[in-house]
Amino acid sequence: MPAVAIPGSKSITARALFLAAAADGVTTLVRPLRSDDTEGFAEGLSRLGYRVGRTPESWQVDGRPEGPAVAEADVYCRDGATTARFLPTLAAAGHGTYRFDASAQMRRRPLLPLSRALRDLGVDLRHEEAEGHHPLTVRASGVEGGEVVLDAGQSSQYLTALLLLGPLTRRGLRIRVTDLVSVPYVEITIAMMRAFGVEVAREGNVFVVPPGGYRATTYAIEPDASTSSYFFAAAAVTPGAEVTVPGLGTGALQGDLGFVDVLRRMGADVSVTPEGATVRGTGRLRGLTVTMRDISDTMPTLAALAPFADGPVRIEDVANTRVKECDRLEACAENLRRLGVEVAVGPDWIEIRPGLDPATAGAEIKTYGDHRIVMSFAVTGLRVPGISFDDPGCVRKTFPGFHEAFAALRRDIGH
Ligand SMILES: O=C(O)C1=C[C@@H](OP(=O)(O)O)[C@@H](O)[C@H](O)C1
Ligand SMILES: C=C(OP(=O)(O)O)C(=O)O
């Protein structure tokens, strides 16, 4: 039964690029994700004067603990929030004038809590148009450090950006967090900082980061757990089908591997070993109520397979999915309704009733340029004939080869 080669984690690749750029020495990233988000991050680093060497198997970055090599740069962050939030933070630790802009959707996505925290730390950061949104300019002169308060209730990426910045400040950082979503992403950050020689201490809601900089290393990127969710879901909706993702096992850093626990609760057979994770469809899919605050990138995956459950599926505590590549709660609801599914949506939840209207075969899914809407409804397409997408190519954000890989899986599991 198929072992699927899933490309590297977007989140880990983005952090590894930041850490490598900031470290003292040359870092090698093994099996980085090559996709629009991470290529955009690497291109941004090049714009800031960092040397990033790329071969198909690995990327090499010459670290510059002193910050960007150029005094001025204009950086386009594309559609990637990690790029749009982490790179201005990295630049703040250097010396120069750096302007950042991003895609239309990324311009709409919020940034203000991070901007405020950076300003509180003395960084000269100005938004050009709307306050708290791209485009923005950082006039950088290094960061002294000290204590700062942060609301990360809309995005953990603000906290990750500040944690990554901490060792580059002169005194270190004490970050007092008033609210926090997507906690497992912060754990990835802390684990990766450790691999680059920095130990973050946590005292309740205060994160303490020592000064002193990072050490270069060789870092292997694990397969992307969010991307894996489509392949695991494909197995779960197909009786007797089995999908294994090697390299995503018990030691994995990514919280989104927790999606397999949701599939297990629904009735799939799941095993996670040190070597990888396997999901097998049993022909049984129970409805359930589940909180996805920690793993909200997999909310669309569950929404798209929910009509095949034997009872309602209710997904709670996912308000921040409204400020991602699109308003994902509304996009999922709209597309499920196009398929004749009964759906209700609230400010931070969605509830999906079982059953599809067979007359909706051939429906076109409205993607809103969101890779996860395409990849999620590709799972629905295993059971509903003729599903198409208005923008199938937007998968390039995290998995340019998705359609080929999913077609191969489809053949393997007999659809
Ligand atoms: O730090 C990261 O790499 C990410 C954190 C999450 O965002 P939020 O913290 O905004 O939920 C996640 O949705 C995103 O895809 C990647
Ligand atoms: C929300 C996502 O990406 P980001 O916030 O990194 O742009 C995602 O990949 O689902």
Image (cartoon, grey):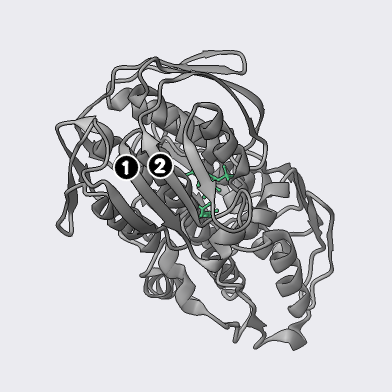
The secondary element bearing badge 1 is classed as strand
Residue sticking out furthest to the top: 203
Q: Which mark is residue 37?
A: none
Asked whether the residues under the numbered discs 2 and 1 touch, taking CB atoms below 8 Å apart as contact, a structural biologist would say yes
Q: Nearer the viewer, residue 393 or 385?
A: 393
Which residue corresponds to the image point at 36% horizontal and 41% vertical from the top-left? 91
- Residue 225 locus on image (x, y percent): 46, 48
Q: Which residue in the structure is indicated by mark 2? A: 139
How busy is the neighbourhood of tag 1: few (under 14 within 10 Å), some, or many (20 plus)? many
Q: How many numbered discs?
A: 2
Q: Is residue 174 above or below residue 109?
A: above
Q: Is residue 383 above or below residue 222?
A: below
Q: Which residue in the structure is indicated by mark 1? A: 96
Q: Answer whether residue 140 is visible to the viewer in this image.
A: yes
Which residue corresponds to the image point at 46% horizontal and 59% vertical from the top-left? 101
Q: Nearer the viewer, residue 72 or 155?
A: 72
Report the side of 212 relative to 85 (left or right).
left
Quadrant where the N terminus lies? Answer: bottom left
- Residue 246 locus on image (x, y percent): 34, 48
- Residue 86 locus on image (x, y percent): 43, 43
Could you give the CA–CA distance between mark 2 and mark 1, rounded to whole angstroms? 6 Å
Q: Nearer the viewer, residue 3 or 256?
A: 256
Which residue corresponds to the image point at 34% horizontal and 53% vertical from the top-left? 41
Which residue corresponds to the image point at 55% horizontal and 47% vertical from the top-left? 269
Q: Is residue 400 above or below residue 346?
A: below
Mark 2 residue type:
Arg
